[in-house]
Amino acid sequence: MKAQEAVVRVNGFGELEAVVMDRLWNRVSETTVREVFDDLAEYREIAYTTVMSTMDNLHRKGWLARVRKGKAFSYWPTLTREEYSARLMRDAFDAGGKSDLVLTHFVEQMSDEESARLRKTLQRLTGDEDTR
C-alpha cells in the first residue's frame, strides 16, 4: 500500500473493504463504482471488477446501501464512520470478558482530554451535573 493510500485497517473489514469504506466515508454524496475505482486507480493497480465486487459484497453485508441510476448503482454507507466505530467498541466490550474490568481498563488508558470529553458526554446524556 502506497503512502497516499495509507488507511488504518478497520476491524471487521478486509483490507480492500476498509479502503473502500474510508473513501465512501470521506465523500458527502452517493458514489458510483467508477468514482471509487478512478480514485483507487491513482494509487494502486486494481481492476474495476474487483472494486465492483467489493462494493457489492459490502452492500450484501449491510455496510452500503445503493440505488440504481441508469445502468449503474450509486452507493452510500449505512453507518457513519463514528457509528461504525461505536459498534466495534460495543462488540469489543461484549466479547472482552468481565465488562466492568474491560471498562475500567479502557478508561485507565484514556488521556486527560479524552477523560474530560467522556465526563462531559456523560453529563449531557444523564443530565447529571456532578459526573466527575
Image (cartoon, helix red, strand yellow):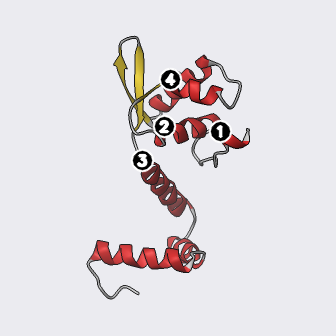
Image coords of residue 122 (percent x, y): 36, 75
In the picture, the disc for residue 24 is 2
> Residue at 60% across / 75% down in the picture?
109
Please, which residue is most extreme toward the right here? 2
**Helix, strand, or loop for circle 1?**
helix
Q: Earlier in the sequence, mark 3 or mark 2?
A: 2
Which quadrant is home to the N terminus?
Answer: top right
Residue 106 location (% of width, % of height): 56, 72
Q: Give the amino acid at mark 4.
A: Val
Disc 2 to disc 4, how far (Cα)?
10 Å
Q: Compare marks 4 and 3 and give the one earlier in the sequence.
A: 4
Marks 1 and 3 sit apart, C-alpha to C-alpha, by 19 Å
Q: Earlier in the sequence, mark 2 or mark 1?
A: 1
Vertically, is 119 above or below 53?
Answer: below
* Label 3 element class: loop
Q: Rounded to the nearest whole Å, what is the CA distance between mark 4 and mark 1?
A: 17 Å
Write down the residue under mark 1: 15
Looking at marks 2 and 4 on the same chain, the residue that comes earlier in the sequence is marked by 2
- Indicate the quadrant containing the C terminus: top left, top right, bottom left or bottom right: bottom left
Query: Residue lying furthest left in this view?
Result: 127
Q: Nearer the viewer, mark 3 or mark 2?
A: 2
- Residue of label 3: 80
Alpha carbon distance from label 2 to label 1: 14 Å
Q: Is residue 3 left or right of residue 123?
A: right
Q: Which mark is residue 33?
A: 4
Furthest toward the top, the residue is 71
Element carrying mark 2: helix
